[in-house]
Amino acid sequence: MQIWYISDGKAGHRAQMLGLAAGLKRQSCPVHLTEIAVQQLSLFTLIASWLSFWLFKRLPAILTHLPMPDLITGVGHRTHWK
């Protein structure tokens, strides 16, 4: 399972994601994590990413070099929209 996780960079939040990955591995689910710093993604970039992928099947340059995810999640309160 390929997981992208948007991170605010705090060690405790990163540890939570690593704990989730460890739990999945214990269930015999192979996991590969890719961390994306929230500072690299503005709200506009995230919306544009979603629209461009669904409309044009393209991702913005910042994400194109990454393997396609099975799951995208955010860790830390700065990664969630309010």
Image: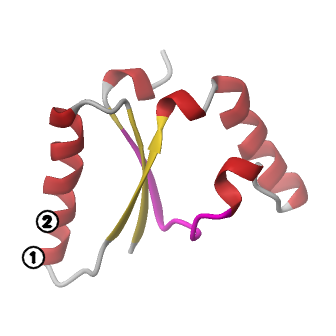
Percent position of residue 34, x then y? 42, 58
Q: In terms of depth relative to the viewer, which is nearer, 3 or 36?
A: 36
**For the residues marked 1 and 2, what is the alpha-carbon distance in whole angstroms?**
6 Å
* Contact flag, marks 1 and 2 (Cβ < 8 Å): yes
How crowded pointer 2 is (Cα within 10 Å; few <14, some 14-19, many 20+) is rated as some
Left or right, residue 32 beside residue 17: right
Q: How did the renderer colour the structure?
A: secondary structure
Instruction: Inspect the magenta stretch and tell me whether residue 67 lies in it.
Output: yes
Q: In terms of depth relative to the viewer, which is nearer, 75 or 39?
A: 39
The quadrant holding residue 28 is: bottom left
Q: Which mark is residue 26?
A: 1
Q: Which residues are magenta?
A: 65-74
- The residue positioned farthest toward the right in the image shown: 56
Residue that appears at 15% across and 34% down: 12
Q: Secondary structure at mark 1?
A: helix
Q: Which residue is mark 2?
A: 22
